[in-house]
Amino acid sequence: AQSVAQPEDQVNVAEGNPLTVKCTYSVSGNPYLFWYVQYPNRGLQFLLKYITGDNLVKGSYGFEAEFNKSQTSFHLKKPSALVSDSALYFCAVSLLGGYQKVTFGTGTKLQVIP
Amino acid sequence: DTEVTQTPKHLVMGMTNKKSLKCEQHMGHRAMYWYKQKAKKPPELMFVYSYEKLSINESVPSRFSPECPNSSLLNLHLHALQPEDSALYLCASSQPRGGGEETQYFGPGTRLLVL
């Protein structure tokens, strides 16, 4: 079985400050991990993914995520938040790599305050 | 071009109506997906076509019927829906690769309201 948890329903951060959106996972094997962003009334946009290799993954729009195997975490980070980053963020995990077995987290709403 | 298009953007239908949602991609992807998303909830996978082979999520009611006329097009036929089926329906595509190398691209969705 596989699962992913996003412990915060909402994260508030001031514009210009660093942001972190948390994600922890549980799989019985090597995980494939993803982050997506969803703007209001829009579909999901792919941000980044971890498959193997370097634990720090860089993605779109200046986002990055750090894979930590010992803590089973894959937190999303950005050094300086923009108001336009305000959106709903989903973490997802797949054990098999293909999207047929992807499990999404419940989502975290990011609010960047001007 | 990394675009997945969906039509219509909005759809209102009665419980006795028959309607179809359409999805198209021209990225040469051989896997296409339908997801259902309720407000402020994560997407739920409904159907997957991979190399024209359908994988059915058995929890999806038969009032939803997918069709893949060719590798670029994906339809979702709707019949006798219930008000609880009102949701955002997302289409996505990817090119299957071994080792998790594939990236999934989503369309903007069709917002469905069943009255």
Image (spheres, coloured by chain):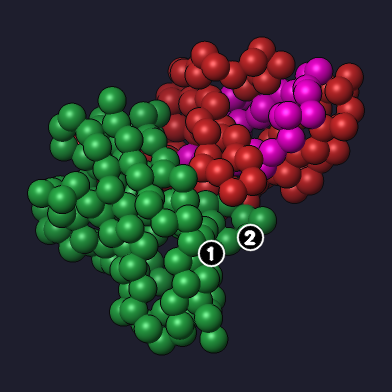
Chain colours: A green, B red
Q: Is residue A50 above or below residue B35?
A: below
Q: Nearer the viewer, residue B22 or B15?
A: B15
Q: Where is residue A45 drawn, in percent x and y? A: 48, 56
Residues at discs 2 and 1 in contact (Cβ within 8 Å):
yes
Query: What's the residue type where badge 1 is placed?
Result: Ala
Q: Where is residue A101 drawn, in percent x and y? A: 36, 29
Residue at image point 21% right, 61% down: A66
Q: Secondary structure at mark 1?
A: strand
**Rendering quarter of residue A100:** top left
Q: Which residue is mark 1?
A: A87
Decide which of tag 2 and tag 1 comes sooner along the chain: 2
Is A32 included in the stretch rendered in magenta?
A: no
Q: Where is residue B51 drawn, in percent x and y? A: 43, 24
Which stretch is magenta? B68-93
**Rendering quarter of residue B94:** top left
Residue A103 seen from this side: yes
